[in-house]
Amino acid sequence: MTSGKLTITIEEARLTRDTETFSKMDPYCVFQLREHIVRTKTITNAGKTPKWNETFSIDVKYIGDDFTITVKDEDIGSDDIVGIGQGKISAMCVPGGIDEWYVVSHKGKNAGQVRIRSAWAPIGGMGASGFAMGSGVNAKGAVDMSGMSGAAQMQAMFG
């Protein structure tokens, strides 16, 4: 399958680059896949060891695409880039998912690593909830069936 629903959890980072001189960094992480961008919350005074543990769902249209991970330090005015990393989304779109550390760099130098876990459900497969993938089951259990065919909606509602 070349498309499906990817669930990623941006767990934590071990950063080697510090953008602050007199205080601790307030880091956050941005994950981008094409036009889909997700951002963790800012962890105030986390310094070089932020723990976000935030989960996001992303619709993957083509597993050959590249993704970008950017770690930033939130500052008044302009946020500083701590490091940027890239990879192929196909590395995350595997049965059983992944739990990996991704390297982020700044100006050609290692700036640390970001730990990401993933779970992959190709379109046409069934998710852990038992709903057809693409049905958009949210955290409260509500189902968004707007992207489903009539038959898939009937299957999701009545089994």
Image (spheres, grey):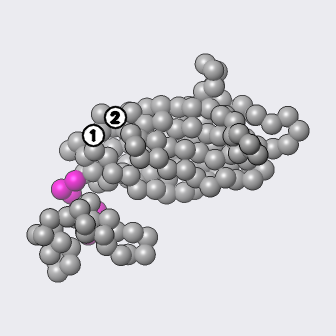
* Residue at (43, 70) in percent of width and height: 139
**In the image: residue 131, left or right of residue 101:** left
Q: Which mark is residue 65?
A: 2
In magenta segment, residue 53:
no
Q: Distance of mark 2 from mark 1, alpha carbons?
A: 6 Å
Q: Is residue 18 left or right of residue 151?
A: right
Is residue 117 in view from this perspective? no
How many circles with numbers are drawn on the protein? 2
- Majority secondary structure of magenta residues: loop
Q: Amino acid at mark 1?
A: Tyr
**Residue positioned 34% across, 34% down in the render:** 65
The residue sitting at 85% across, 34% down in the picture is 21
Q: Secondary structure at mark 1?
A: loop
The answer to the question of whether label 2 and label 1 lie on touching residues, with beta carbons closer than 8 A, is: yes
Amino acid type, callout 2 = Asp
Res 114 → quadrant: top right
Q: Residue 104, image x and y in percent? A: 58, 31
Q: Quadrant of the N terminus?
A: top left
Q: Which residue is mark 1?
A: 62
Residue visible at 60% across and 27% down in the picture = 105
The answer to whether residue 125 is visible is: yes
For the magenta stretch, what is the residue range? 123-130
Question: Toward which corner of the image does residue 130 lie, by quadrant?
Answer: bottom left
Q: Is residue 4 left or right of residue 141?
A: left
Q: Nearer the viewer, residue 72 or 101?
A: 72
